[in-house]
Image (spheres, rainbow, N blue to C red):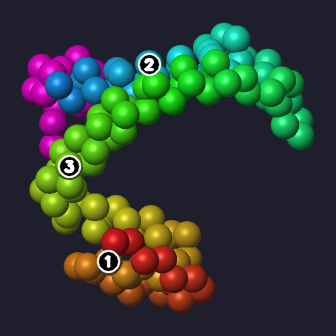
Amino acid sequence: MDSDPALRNLFGVAQVNPALARDGIRIRQFGQQTIEILGGKRIHPGWVVPGGVSEALTSAKRDAILASIPEVQAIAVRTLEWYKHAFDKFQDEIDTFATSQACSWGWSMTTTRSKCTTEGCASRTWMAR
């Protein structure tokens, strides 16, 4: 949130944290490969049709997807650990945005540090933890 907007992209992340950038690319690659395995192509596959899919998932395709799960799960865990520290660093900004956004939606928001008190926020309750 506090970085130069020109650096808030993959190249900026790669300069500051190359491993995080590589992990992001790998997660996206896994998603694209999974779409390709299931649908035959990465962009706009025709596999999904109204009411379901056009063909059954074969065991070979299932195994190809499952083979990557341990690696992708490890990336997700690393990313969440990194995010926990980033989240704490920007708690004031998160509270401000989340509170104003929740109130604009007419929700009552409770976090560990703030409570939305804007008029009209009593219609729903949203707990952010």
Residue identified by numbered label 2: 29
Label 3 CA crowd tier, 10 Å (few <14, some 14–19, many 20+): few
Instruction: Please state if 31 lies on the left or on the right of 17 as rendered.
Output: right
Q: CA distance from mark 3 to mark 1?
A: 20 Å
Q: Foreground mark, 2 or 1?
A: 2
Q: CA distance from mark 2 to mark 1?
A: 34 Å
Q: Nearer the viewer, residue 34 or 2?
A: 34
Q: Nearer the viewer, residue 11 or 44?
A: 44
Q: CA distance from mark 2 to mark 3?
A: 21 Å
Residue identified by numbered label 3: 81
Label 2 CA crowd tier, 10 Å (few <14, some 14–19, many 20+): few
Q: For the magenta stretch, what is the residue range?
A: 1-18
Residue identified by numbered label 1: 111
Secondary structure that dominates the magenta span: helix
Asked whether residue 13 is in view, the answer is no
Could you say whether the residue bearing mark 2 is in a helix, strand or loop? helix
